[in-house]
Amino acid sequence: QVQLVESGGGLVQPGGSLRLSCTASGRIFRINAMGWYRQAPGKERELVAQIFSTGSTTYADSAKGRFTISRDSAKNTVYLQMNSLKPEDTAVYYCNVDGGPPYFRSWGQGTQVTVSS
């Protein structure tokens, strides 16, 4: 069992910043990838950003230039720095981690991000 604990969501004005954190704990041999997804009301869950064990990253087009994903491998923690937030960034943000062996893929409980004036 691998558990994920997220923090850092909240209410922010347009143009503001937030930093999300997610820490994985449990029986972890190796983490392959850590990422952030989001789901807005009435929409499907979508990938925001992902970072791999090699250090390479990938971003959704909507996140490029505004969001930065990073990690602290020693702490099994992934961060999402979100700058220049827009109302359309409002969603529940979920952390996702996969690794192994044995293979696992875990989701966090979600943290609400609301961008509103």
Image (spheres, grey):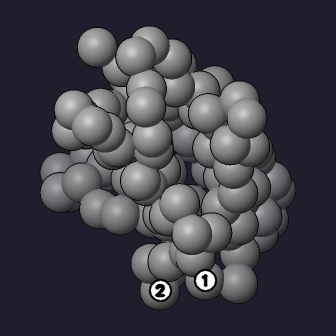
Can you see residue 79?
Answer: no
Query: Which label belongs to residue 61?
Result: 2
In front of the other: 65 or 17:
65
Q: Pointer 1: what residue? A: 64
Q: Residue at x 57, y 69 (%)?
A: 54
Q: Amino acid at mark 2?
A: Asp
Farthest right residue? 16
Q: Position of residue 113 (x, y in %)?
A: 56, 40
Q: Secondary structure at mark 2?
A: loop
- Quadrant of image for the N terminus: top left
Q: Badge 2, how many Cα within 10 Å: few under 14, some, many 20+?
A: few
Q: Which percent across, then down, holds residue 85? A: 69, 63
**Which residue corresponds to the image point at 50% horizontal and 64% vertical from the top-left?**
52
Would you identify the image quadrant in which residue 16 lies? bottom right
Q: Is residue 30 left or right of residue 47?
A: right
Q: In this view of the protein, which residue sits in the foreground, 104 or 57?
A: 104
Relative to 65, does residue 108 appear above or below in the rendering? above
